[in-house]
Image (cartoon, grey):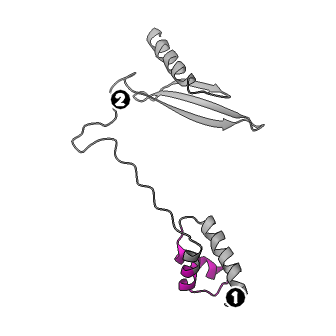
Amino acid sequence: MTGRSPDDEERLINQIVRLAAKYGRYGYRRITALLRDEGWRVNHKRVERLWRQEGLKVPQKQPKRGRLWLNDGSSIRLRPERKDHVWSYDMAMERTSDGRPLRILALIDEYTRECLLLYVARRIRSGDVPDQLYGAVHHERNA
């Protein structure tokens, strides 16, 4: 895997594309270093030319999430002050040993971190979520 010949160009392009797919956040300079580690005799200018020719680009970084509160101390979302003040729910998915899916709806009290509800079913439809939350609210009030 050395040298520079016209028949070599196709293999080099394939290798650049393969490495770019494997290392999605790497640019042409890092890909050049990886190619050299593999034994290719290439310089960054050639790799950059082929990189652009193939239309490869490094995706933009995703912006970090903002704070949940403002500088004046006010809250964008409610901070829990007592039991049953703020609840949160989340959905999770697992698979059984035979590969069949299990859906899990979890409801927690943010103040006590107590799990109020774990609803497990093969399928949870959008209408099931409010029904389960409504049931949890009434169960808490009656308890």
Instruction: Check the image and name the residue furthest to the top.
Output: 142
Mark 2 / mark 1, whichever is N-terminal: 1
Q: Quadrant of residue 38?
A: bottom right
Badge 1: how crowded within 10 Å, few (<14), some, or many (20+)?
Answer: few
Magenta region, main secondary structure: helix
- Number of callouts: 2
Residue 9 % position (x, y)? 67, 83
Q: Quadrant of residue 128?
A: top right
The residue depicted at 58 percent of the width and 35 percent of the height is 92
Instruction: Check the image and name the residue furthest to the right.
Output: 98
Badge 2: how crowded within 10 Å, few (<14), some, or many (20+)?
Answer: some
Tell me the tag on residue 6. 1
User: Which quarter of the rendered picture does the N terminus lie within?
Assistant: bottom right
Residue 77 % position (x, y)? 34, 34
Q: Which residue is mark 2?
A: 80
Nearer to me, 86 or 20? 20
Nearer to me, 127 or 27? 127
Residue 29 falls within the magenta-colored stretch: yes
Is 90 located above or below residue 53 in the figure?
above
Is 132 located above or below residue 74 in the figure?
above
* Amino acid carrying mark 2 in the image: Pro
Nearer to me, 96 or 48? 48
- Look at the numbered disc 1 and give the secondary structure of its residue: helix
Residue 42 falls within the magenta-colored stretch: yes
Q: Taking 114 as reference, is 36 left or right?
A: right
The residue depicted at 60 percent of the width and 69 percent of the height is 20
Q: CA distance from mark 2 to mark 1?
A: 67 Å
Q: Quadrant of residue 22?
A: bottom right
Q: Which residues are magenta?
A: 26-49
The residue depicted at 32 percent of the width and 27 percent of the height is 81
* Amino acid carrying mark 1 in the image: Pro
